């Protein structure tokens, strides 16, 4: 498919797939006389634009949709909003990107992790960038006389790793809009890769669902988005499932704080009782348990201009990457073995993060599950705080929930490996644990 609606904007290959290349060549290219793009001799390639977050995928996506992104960076003055909503199909927003790992050594090294697999943190960045591009495409009215909408990541519903992703085999990500509300858009992405050196047909290695919201670029208020008309039976099922998840999110936002039922109250009391032993009689505490606060890690950073997106805010994929790295380290220190990523359970983008913000990321293990001894589960929470020392204020900007297990090859080297139970020291910690367990169970119910 063609990403761009007019021939003058067309920079997409004929097969509709955007190839991803390593960034070193473009990053080191001379600044003088840059090659023309999109037929314009006075525009530098986006890879050379200063003050924007660059990665192989963001560079490829922004180049592919260069003129639309230029409109977002420099919208027409006093342009009116879109006057009439369009009806689009999922196929019109469907976009794919291809990683030529098998032939591009430099790209392969940019994505390689210590276990010869793809770095999940970098992949999270790419998923967010592709989902954002798809949402922009769906919202575009193809007219240069109207002001474009700003689309921002509102939440990540779920990211599930279904199999290991090798860094030696070509990789493809395909995504499209599967549901829209008044100003909300849900995008589903699938990462596919052949099983062994390209011998078998591609199979799904990872799935992801992102929710974006549209804002008027002038007023900042919620803006209506183009309608969606699913065509195939599969698209209609995806639409209905996304509609149910949207209704669930509305109930969570509009409802009061969940009241625990009798069984949950008993569980709450049991958790607190074990935690009080740690606090009051530590010598008698269960050696197979650990206080939640003792699983914590933290890091901090000043958000830099090079980490911002086209709207001037800090790129959501960058925040997910940093949160993932901290969650991975937290799991490693807790389990004592190399972790293996399974899921992003949920991410909330509660408020934007700006350039210059002092961001503190705090992590902890919320709970563990050992129902399956071959795959014990570790649920990690990361909370990002925008801190302003001069105002003596700290606000939560993002919450992230990840699920890990331990790498099987590492587990077999440690006989008698056993995960500790996590217990709370306070009622607030106990409620956080139970609320997360309840949310995870509820989400699974709506997915079955």
Image: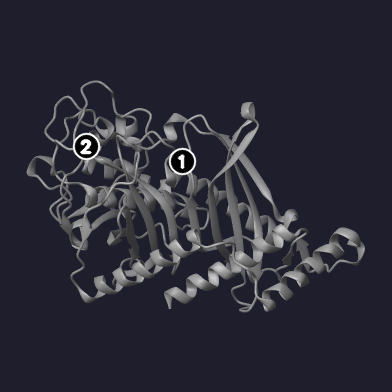
In the image, taking residue 329 as reference, residue 21 lies left or right, namely left
Q: Quadrant of residue 73?
A: top left
Q: Which residue is mark 1?
A: 352
Residue closer to the observer: 436 or 264? 264
How far apart, in angstroms, are the residues tagged by discs 2 and 1?
A: 22 Å
Vertical arrangement, residue 302 with respect to residue 410, above or below: above
Q: Position of residue 425 (x, y in %)?
A: 78, 59
Quadrant of residue 387 in the image? top right
Residue 162's x, y, as percent? 44, 69
Between residue 111 and residue 422, name the one nearer to us: 422
Q: In the structure shown, which secondary structural element does the residue marked by tag 2 occupy?
A: loop
- Residue 206 appears at what percent x and percent y? 40, 64
Q: Position of residue 239 (x, y in %)?
A: 29, 68
Label 2 crowd bin: few (<14), some (14–19), many (20+), radius 10 Å: many
Q: Nearer the viewer, residue 142 or 405?
A: 142
In the image, which disc is placed on residue 194?
none
Residue shown at 65% from the left, 64% from the top: 433
Number of callouts: 2
* Labels 2 and 1: the sequence-earlier one: 2
Circle 1 sits in a helix, a strand or a loop, which is it?
A: loop
Q: Is residue 261 left or right of residue 33?
A: right
| Residue highlighted by disc 2 | 147
**Applied colour scheme:** one colour
Q: Residue at x 45, y 62 (%)?
A: 249
- Asked if residue 407 lies left or right of residue 444, the reply is right
Q: How many C-alpha atoms fall within 10 Å of the one at disc 1: few (<14), some, or many (≥20)?
A: some
Q: Is residue 154 visible?
A: yes
The residue at the point 61 percent across, 38 percent down is: 394
């Amino acid at each position: 498919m063609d990403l761009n609606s007019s021939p003058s904007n067309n920079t997409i290959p004929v097969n509709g797939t955007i190839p991803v290349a390593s960034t070193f060549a473009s990053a080191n290219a001379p600044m003088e006389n840059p090659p023309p793009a999109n037929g314009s001799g006075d525009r530098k390639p986006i890879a050379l634009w200063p003050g924007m977050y660059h990665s192989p995928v963001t560079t490829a996506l922004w180049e592919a949709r260069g003129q639309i992104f230029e409109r977002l960076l420099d919208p027409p003055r006093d342009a009116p909003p879109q006057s009439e909503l369009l009806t689009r199909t999922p196929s019109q927003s469907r976009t794919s990107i291809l990683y030529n790992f098998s032939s591009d050594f430099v790209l392969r090294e940019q994505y390689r992790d210590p276990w010869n697999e793809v770095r999940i943190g970098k992949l999270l960045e790419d998923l967010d960038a592709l989902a954002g591009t798809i949402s922009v495409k769906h919202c575009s009215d193809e007219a240069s006389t109207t002001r474009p909408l700003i689309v921002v990541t509102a939440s990540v519903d779920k990211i599930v790793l279904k199999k290991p992703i090798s860094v030696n085999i070509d990789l493809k990500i395909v995504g499209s809009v599967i549901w829209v509300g008044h100003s909300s858009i849900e995008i589903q992405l699938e990462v596919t890769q052949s099983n062994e050196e390209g011998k078998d047909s591609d199979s799904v290695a990872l799935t992801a669902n992102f929710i974006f919201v549209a804002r008027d670029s002038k007023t900042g208020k919620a803006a209506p988005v183009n309608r969606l008309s699913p065509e195939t039976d599969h698209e209609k099922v995806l639409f209905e499932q996304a509609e149910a998840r949207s209704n669930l999110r509305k109930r969570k936002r509009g409802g009061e704080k969940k009241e625990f039922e009798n069984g949950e109250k008993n569980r709450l009391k049991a958790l607190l009782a074990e935690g009080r032993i740690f606090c009051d009689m530590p010598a008698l505490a269960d050696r197979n348990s650990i206080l939640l606060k003792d699983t914590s890690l933290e890091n901090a950073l000043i958000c830099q201009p090079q980490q911002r997106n086209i709207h001037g805010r800090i790129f959501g994929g960058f925040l997910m990457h940093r949160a993932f790295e901290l969650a991975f380290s937290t799991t490693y220190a807790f389990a004592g073995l190399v972790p293996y990523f399974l899921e992003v359970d949920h991410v909330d983008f509660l408020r934007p993060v700006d350039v210059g913000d002092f961001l503190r990321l705090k992590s902890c293990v919320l709970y563990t599950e050992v129902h399956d001894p071959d795959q014990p589960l570790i649920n990690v929470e990361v909370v990002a705080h925008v801190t302003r020392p001069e105002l003596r204020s700290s606000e939560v900007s993002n919450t992230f929930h990840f699920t890990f297990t331990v790498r099987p090859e590492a587990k077999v080297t440690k006989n008698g490996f056993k995960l500790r139970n996590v217990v709370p020291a306070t009622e607030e910690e106990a409620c956080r644990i139970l609320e997360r367990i309840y949310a995870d169970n509820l989400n699974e119910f709506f997915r079955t």
